[in-house]
Image (cartoon, rainbow, N blue to C red):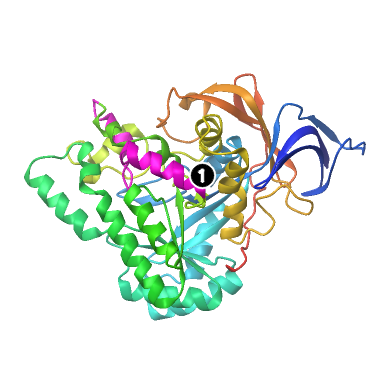
Amino acid sequence: MSVLIKGGLIVTSTESYKADLLIEGEKITTIGTNLTCQADEVVDARGKYILPGAIDPHTHLCMPFMGTYAQDDYKSGTIAAACGGVTTIVDFQIQHKGESILQGLERKKALATGNVVVDYSLHPAITDPRPEVIEEVKAAIQDYGTPSFKIFMVYDFRVDDGVMVQLLEQTKKYGGLVQVHAENPFIIQHMNEVLAAEGKLDPYYHAVSRPNIAEEEAIARAAKLVEFTDSRLYVVHLSSREGLEKIKEFRKRGIEIYAETCPQYLLLDEERYKEPDFNGAKYVMSPPLRTKESNEALWSGLSSGDVQVLSTDHCPFDFKGKKDMFGKDDYKKIPNGAPGIETLMTLLHSEGVVKGRLSLERMVDVLSTSTAKMFGLKDKGAIAVGKDADIVVFDPEQKFTISQSKLHMNVDYNPYEGVEIAGMPHQVFSRGLKVAEWRKDQVVFVGEVGRGKFIKRAPFV
């Protein structure tokens, strides 16, 4: 199968230029002007952008949490991804007690096989750091194709500083990357006790219980351990101005520390928790939504390069039947998480590029190119000959009002319901196969369930 895309504006992380692009099989084979080669399909991309497919490196599909499960499985979650212009995901595999890293990866792959519609990889999350698991990190980096490892500084399954030091040393030695959910659990525990004693248990107090300083302190402590080990660290879902300032401070000292943020921390703030009739529960996630000052600081960090990657932390729970299942009278029992995988690219274009907060090229960098480099996706993340033909033909003029009824995420609400979007995917290709396209008033899935494959990732360099 061959596809010739003609007359679009090709956007890379460094430049934009008008050209044609030829896909043959699964790869980009030719880029040039006025191409006349024969193809099975010709796409008229005049007036449209030709973008590399977005990579979402932070998703939670099929994940058990707080007495229930994240509702998107690998089929529904990757269909939603495709319809939003996301052509690769890196999902988290949370280690079960007693599992090896390999056993956990195989368990998660079994759920994905035959169901994914775009390509995927996995991050092992280390929650049972037995000595043999620490030793297995080398094999995960060099043999399993999973060189990034998540640890939590919060929750019952958090790791202590000693384990963090061991993982930082191992990943430094063999070319891996430690990812950290950075919050201080003791500050949160204290605030939970104070608020419970005062009878303050509405959704708004979820944000109060996890103050900015809890993130700031945890980032600082983790960064000191990076300094001690001369290793490297990646902070997931950075949410606060204070956390960003701490990262910048350590980076100026030569400490190798990277960060991602998510659309919710750019566009939503803690006032959402005050929505009546328990609607504030829709935004209960960890870390919580912050202030408008943090929103603006993170936009600035994304534009300047102090924040390298944009992800979603996609982890959806129905508002009715899950968010309210245990948490009606206690914010601590509301399942933490929100949907976002399908609106990642469109929100960043509409709220970022269109509103002048960042350039088109920077959008491509934080959605695709930097992410591919960070996580060893060698064939992804760029419009270049030889790369996988993961391509979004994007219409910057197409308007769309976000409505859960016209999205594909398996959840009964959307945090951005009613937001008017400027710019939508026109056609989406995953390794040369069209998987989604705009029809009438929404993007629809046109791909093949099960065609997506597991991607082994290269070690960090």
Front residue of 32/185: it is 32
Q: Position of residue 451 (x, y in %)?
A: 67, 47
Q: Position of residue 199 (x, y in %)?
A: 9, 40
Name the main secondary structure of what is drawn in magenta.
helix
Question: Going 50% across and 53% down the picture, which residue do you hit?
Answer: 91
Front residue of 19/167: it is 19
**Secondary structure type for disc 1:** helix
Seen in the picture, residue 54 relative to 254 is either above or below; the reply is above
Label 1: how many Cα within 10 Å (few below 14, some 14–19, many 20+): some
- Does residue 169 show up? yes
For residue 348, side relative to residue 50 (left or right): left
The span picked out in magenta is: 276-304
Question: Going 62% across and 63% down the picture, which residue do you hit?
Answer: 456
For residue 138, side relative to residue 163 (left or right): right
Q: Is residue 401 a member of the stretch shown in magenta?
A: no
* Residue type indicated by callout 1: Ser
Seen in the picture, residue 166 relative to 350 is either above or below; the reply is below
Q: Which residue is labeled 1 in the image?
A: 303
Quadrant of the image for the C terminus? bottom right
Q: How many marks?
A: 1
Seen in the picture, residue 138 relative to 271 is either above or below; the reply is below
Q: From this viewpoint, which residue is outermost toward the left?
A: 197
Q: Position of residue 261 (x, y in %)?
A: 44, 48
- Indicate the quadrant where residue 390 lies: top right
